[in-house]
Each structure stands twice: as structure tokens, then as C-alpha cells.
Amino acid sequence: MPQRQEKYSRLFTSSLILTSPGIAVLFLLVILHLIVWQAALAAGVIILLGTGYILSSHYSHVEKLKEYITALRQLKGKDPLPGIPSAAGSFLYPELNLSLSRMAQERQQYRRQLEAVTEGNEAILSSLPDPLIMLGKKRQIIRGNPAAQAIFGDNITGRELSTILRNPGILSAVDSVENSSENISRFVEFKIHGRVERYMLARIARMNEQTWDGTRVIVSLHDQTAAKKVDQMRGDFIANASHELKTPLASLMGFIETLKGPAKDDPEAQQRFLNIMQDQSERMSHLVSDLLSLSRIELLEHTPPTGITDLNNIITKITEGLHTQIENKQITIRKDLSPDLENSIPVLGDAEALTQLFQNLLENAVKYGHKGTTVTIRGKAYGPGSQGMRRLGRPSVAIAIIDQGDGIPREHIPRLTERFYRVDAARSRELGGTGLGLAIVKHIVNRHRGVLTIDSEVGRGSTFTVYLPKAAMSEMNLPAWESSNLA
């Protein structure tokens, strides 16, 4: 009702303004006695009503055009254009319909072109493997691409950069680039701390012009972990190999000298020394193989696997491969899996690496378990609110390898995963151990963003439990998940 009253009021006022010159002329004619006042009054009323009728039709048309323009403004995505209102009854400007229709079509075409360009840019940003962070004024994060969200989380938009990157060098470089009047770039190397350290190179660049979303500075991060690991691997390999190979090489050299000298004509001594030399050679071969394997695992440790692996198949193949050792020691392998894991144990992981992990654990369980005892493989799935969920921050699977051996004194447990650390060095070498098996296990678990726990009781045996992220088949392309403390 108020809108209708406002409409009539506007119509009456407009009609009165437009007819005022004619009414003034009629009033002048009455004063000059050229027409009688009754005729002037009738003529004035007719002029006023006629003008009001014409304006009423025009205002109705304008109102429809106003609604049409409002509908155009509310269009979203690929919505079709609303129908143009009819120009029937508009005596003042019927061509206005055609002009608005052309404008709307051009606007819709331009909008679709803009959306296509935007979608293309978004696709490019999403496919970039390097993390990108777009910053506005005062280091406010406008958005980040999926690679950045995989590292820093999905809720980074609107936050201040220092809440996710607390590195003073990066923050100082961002301020320097943002406040500069020139288009400059800065490079900063930094490290992301956590169970798996990552080395990054940040490139901070200023935008040439103000963008539609307010981006002023772009921070691109380049992962240099692999290159750093290669350099570190060279040094570690040389140091470890020189230390561990020194003893067997010295033994081989000594036996060779003995065979060439005092034992030259002693067949019995020759056979005994050759057997020892063969054992030492095999030990060196295993040592080099394990060192190379450990180096490869460390090189990939910063990139979590995204494939689906069934641990049930892996464990079954490993136990079949250990058949000879199991029979020789009369070991019994017992599986104790929860009902939901009996047919399949799907985890997020790399099949080759997980095979090596459980190969090492099961070999140790058979090797160090007492003759005639049982090795138990226990599996359990953990969902929301459970222990495994709290350990990894997501649903997980725990596989425990339980042996019945001598056990490990508690003071040795924290150091078991160190390179070449042995509780009983002589026994380990006697059984063919290189001292790298559990170090390899630790790094494989780290790469899978899992957890390794060790429990042992002297005289009763040991339990090695591996927690790994559980996966459903729908997670085949799940993005990398990782929890890091940043500095």
C-alpha cells in the first residue's frame, strides 16, 4: 500500500509539473477574457488527465525495466537471461527495451568469458605442485592453492602470515617487498620442523598491479628437501660405510695374508678361513644394501604416499617367504586380527616400503624369538575418539608384531631405532644383523606419517606396534596429510 501511494503521488506531481505551462496559459486567457473560466477549467482537467495517462503507461514500463535490471544483477554462474519486458504502451522511449536487451547480452557474454578465464586460472593454480600463498595488506592471507593448504591447513584464508609461518626472515622479506615502490623479489631459505624436517625456499614477489581480489604479494614455496637429503646422504653414507666396513675389511685382509702365508699348505685352515671370509663378505654386502635402502627411504621421507595398500596381502607374502626360517626354529605364526580386518587391511601407503617394514619386523621376531615359541601378528582398527585416532589425528590401523624372546632392557628401548645401535652387538652380528633394520622401519613409518611404539619385558619378549593411516578405496587420490610444527 505505501508503494502504491508513493507511485500515485509521483504520478500526480509529474503530471502537474508537465501540465503547468498549459494551465498557466489557460489562466492568462481567462484574465484577458478571451475564454470563460468554465472552459479553461475543463481544458485544464482534460490536459492533466491526459498527461497522467501517458505518464502512467511510461512509469509502468520503467518499473518493469527496473525489475529486469535487478534480475540481471542477481544472475549467478550460467543462469539464463530473464525475458525482456514488453514495450507496449510506452509512448516516450520504446527503444529503451532494445538497448537494455543488447546491454544484457553483452554483459552475459563478458561475464561468461571472465568466468572461463577465472576457472582456467584456478585450474592452473590448483595443478601447481609448489605451494602458493597470496597476501593482501599487512600480511593478510587472501588465499592459498591446494598445495599450500596441504601443508598449512584448509583454514588459512583471512589469517595473518605469521600464524602459519613464524620465520622472521620470511616476515621481514614480505614487509620489505610490500612497502617497496619497485617490483622486487626476495628469496629466503627456511626449515619446517616436525618428525620429518622439510627444507624450503621461499620466493616473495610483489604484484605489478592491484588485482581484483586485493593480492599485493605472492609467496611461492619450493621444496628443497630432496636436494638437501642427497647432500646429507653422501656424508652419512661415507661416514657409516667407513666405520662399519672397517672391521670386516680388516678381517678379510688378515685372512688373505694368512692364506698366502702360514696357511698356504693347510687345507683345513684354508676351508675354515674361506668360510669366515664368505660370512664377512655377505655381511658387507648386506650392510651396503641396507645403507643404500636407508638412503632411498630418507630421500622420500618428506613426501607422504597417497596410494592404497592392503597389509593383509603383504603380511601373508612375507610369512610365506620366511617359511624356511620359521620351520628351522619351529616358530608358530598366529594372526589375531579384529573382524573388520580379517579380509583386508587397507592403509594409505607405499606397498614396497611397507613390505620392507614388516619384513624387517617379522624377520627380527623369528630371529630373536625362542625356538618353539609363537610370533603373534595382532591387528586392530581405530576410529574417532580411540587411541589410534588420537595418535595420528585420523582413523588408523595398528599392526603389532609380538615375539617370545629374551626381551630388551628398558634403558635400551629409546635408542633401538638409531643407526647401528645394538643391544647385544656380538649376537646381532652372529645372526647376520647390520644394525640398520629398525632405523629403516622408523623412517618408513615417518614417511607414512605413522607412529612406531616398542614395548618389551626381559625374559618374556617384545612387541613392535606400527600405527598407519587407515584408508578407504574412495581415498585413492586423497591429498597429502601431514601435521607439522612450523618455524
Image (spheres, rainbow, N blue to C red):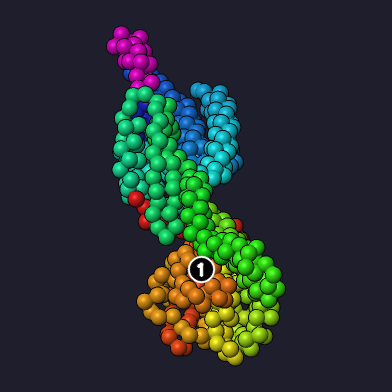
Magenta span of residues: 15-36
Rendering quarter of residue 411: bottom left
Residue at 41 percent across and 75 percent down: it is 413
Q: Residue at x 54, y 73 (%)?
A: 429
Mark 1 — residue?
A: 435
Q: Is residue 261 visible?
A: yes
Closer to the camera in the image, 463 or 242? 242
Which residue: 33% across, 27% down?
180
The amino acid at mark 1 is Gly
Residue 196 is a magenta residue = no
Location of residue 431 with respect to 133 vertically, above or below: below
Please rate how many residues cluster around mark 1, counting C-alpha atoms within 10 Å: few if below 14, some from 14 to 19, many from 20.
Answer: many
Residue 487 lies, in percent from the top left, at 34, 50
* Residue farthest along the bottom direction in this orientation: 372
Residue shown at the point (65%, 74%) measured from the top left: 269
Quadrant of the image occupied by residue 384: bottom left
Residue 274 locus on image (x, y percent): 66, 69
Q: Is residue 158 left or right of residue 73?
A: left
Please provide percent x and percent y for residue 147. 50, 48
- Give the prevailing secondary structure in the magenta stretch: helix
The number of numbered badges drawn on the structure is 1
Q: Could you say where residue 23 lies in the image, as x and y percent from the top left?
A: 35, 18
Image check: 477 left or right of 168?
right
The kind of secondary structure element at disc 1 is loop
Position of the N terminus, as image quadrant, is top left
Is residue 80 or residue 333 the one in the foreground?
333
